[in-house]
Image: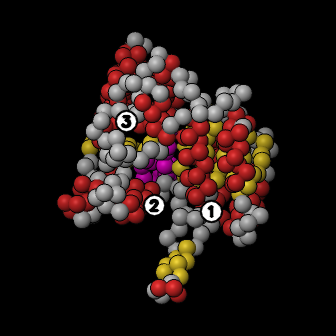
Amino acid sequence: MKKIDISVIPGDGIGKEVMPEALKVLETVAEVHGGLSFSFKHYPWSCDYYIEHNKMMPEDGLDQLKESDAVFLSAVGDPNLVPDHISLWGLLVKIRREFEQVINIRPAKQMKGIQSPLVHPNDFDLIVVRENSEGEYSEVGGRIHRGEDEVAIQNAVFTRKGVERAVEYGFQLAQNRRGHVTSATKSNGIVHSMPFWDSVFESVAEKYPDVKTASNHIDALASFFVTRPQEFDVIVASNLFGDILTDVGAAIMGSIGIAPAANININGKYPSMFEPVHGSAPDIYGKGIANPIGQIWTGKMMLDHFGEHELGNTLLQVIEEVLQDGIKTPDIGGTSSTTEVSDAIVTRLKTLK
């Protein structure tokens, strides 16, 4: 029996609604598999926890998490309780940085059963590899003076090591997909970091002569995601560019509520973390209409991470079959509740036993 220990952090808002549904689906997947089991350890770290303890997680929080095989996170943040920069940097970003989760990957595809807001001649199936540890989201900088003389300086930090490992990951991924990597750049406007990014990309590409490449400026690339997403396979991007592109990817799928993500540790020192792209959506929390598919598809990425690719593909196929049956939450044109969607997925999975 293969046992996987998972640290579970539902977080805030709809995270507390979709996480139990995703765990229910994962337990069913393990039941169907027969040779797989999950052990879930739950952590209440959230904005509510911050209000009570004045911190998003305890001092030894990371020590607790590192004992697990993976971290399964949902939504973080409630600006009505805690400013976003405190909630995100105190929990989500803290885990990403200190667990050296240097790669963020987010797929986007034309899901069967969901009408994209755009009409495409062919189905799209792409994945963005986002550098996750530096770039434009560096903490280097500061503010000086006050009033009309106030100055804010934000430094983008690009290291050869950081860029290389992100680009390498993208090329290795492409070798098992359709063999094409696109680089997101802006070297015609950002005169130091982006030409550096381009040169590292070109250097890594030389090691993969079997993989085709392209380089697009980020403004054009964002528009291409809208007008011709079917042409893309793997896209490698800096921290900021990857963040923006993946929200566009979620939009063209039909809803940010279905978009998954993974934060990958590639050196084996710490667990990786899996989280949906959507936020805590306090405006719909408690209504029972949050879309659980983003969290469940994120669980599929976690299965892939542990080498259970066949199981992961089966789960994604079942999700699409349920969507084709018309069992959908309101954000994608349906009338089903959160639990009705997850229950339908569980029921269909059980027919595979």
Q: Look at label 1 and name its amino acid.
A: Lys
Q: Pointer 1: residues within 10 angstroms few (<14), some, or many (20+)?
A: few
Q: Is residue 168 visible?
A: no
Closer to us: 293 or 255: 255
Determine the CA span between mark 1 and mark 2. Answer: 15 Å
Question: Disc 2 marks which amino acid?
Answer: Arg
Stretch of the chain drawn in magenta: 259-274
Near-viewer residue (254 or 112)? 254
Q: Mark 1 = which residue? A: 161
Secondary structure of the residue carrying numbered label 3: loop
Above or below: residue 321 compared with residue 274: above
Secondary structure under badge 1? helix
Residue 116 placement (x, y as % from top left): 59, 31
Query: Does the magenta segment cover residue 269?
Result: yes
Q: Is residue 284 magenta?
A: no
Residue pictured at 59% horizontal, 41% vertical: 249
215 with respect to 18 (left or right): right
Upstream in sequence: badge 1 or badge 3: 1
CA distance for labels 2 and 3: 29 Å
- The residue under label 3 is 290
**Residue 275: x, y in percent?**
43, 44
Q: Quadrant of the N terminus?
A: top left
Disc 2, SS? helix
Residue 172 falls in image quadrant: top right
Mark whose residue sits in front, 1 or 2: 2
Which residue is depicted at the point 67% across and 48% down?
A: 222
Residue 97 appears in the picture as rendered: yes
